[in-house]
Amino acid sequence: MTAGTDYSRNSRNMAEDTDYSRNTRNMTEGTYYSRNTRNMTEGTNYSRNSRNMTEGTDYSRNTRNMTEGTGYSRKHKAYDRGYQLEQKYKKYDRGHRLQQQHKKYYRERR
């Protein structure tokens, strides 16, 4: 309904008016967001369950990696993908294998 400003209650997007229905999912004009929005891009108030909050420096309690600060989680080595792969593929690494053989050879000669 483009001409009037009377909208039906269940319409999802209402582009003209600033009175929104209760069930609208996205409200682009106003700064009032519905209660269930996961990401609120305008304000700095984030929903309680958001995992990553990119604007502020307050992070949620459950974040594993905090990229701004230098305080990492205690087990950060375990969550570090590069470190995991390095440990996993060390035995297949030719340089590492030769180094181990070299050590073994010199140990036996002594």
Image (spheres, rainbow, N blue to C red):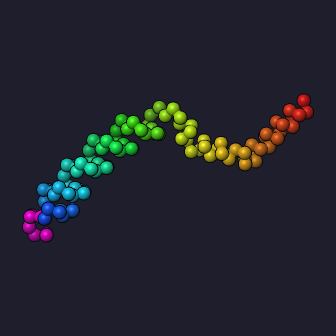
Residue 3 lies in magenta, yes or no?
Answer: yes
* Residue found at x 62% / y 46%: 85
* Residue found at x 84% / y 37%: 104
Q: Position of residue 71 (x, y in %)?
A: 47, 31
Magenta-drawn stretch, dominant element (helix, strand or loop): loop
Quarter of the image where the C terminus is located? top right
Q: Considering only vertical position in the picture, is 39 above or below 57?
A: below
* Residue found at x 76% / y 48%: 94
Q: Position of residue 20 (x, y in %)?
A: 15, 57
Residue 40 lies in magenta, yes or no?
Answer: no
Residue projecting furthest to the top: 110
Residue stretch rendered in magenta on the structure: 1-7
Q: Does residue 60 appear to the left or right of 21 in the view shown?
A: right
Q: Position of residue 1 (x, y in %)?
A: 13, 70
Q: Considering only vertical position in the picture, is 56 above or below 20?
A: above
Q: Position of residue 19 (x, y in %)?
A: 12, 56
| Closest to the observer, 88 or 67 | 88
Q: How many marks?
A: 0
Q: Quadrant of residue 7?
A: bottom left
Residue projecting furthest to the right: 109
Q: Does residue 71 appear to the left or right of 91 in the view shown?
A: left
| Closest to the observer, 68 or 81 | 81
* Residue found at x 77% / y 44%: 97
Q: Considering only vertical position in the picture, is 101 above or below 38?
A: above
| Closest to the observer, 23 or 109 | 23
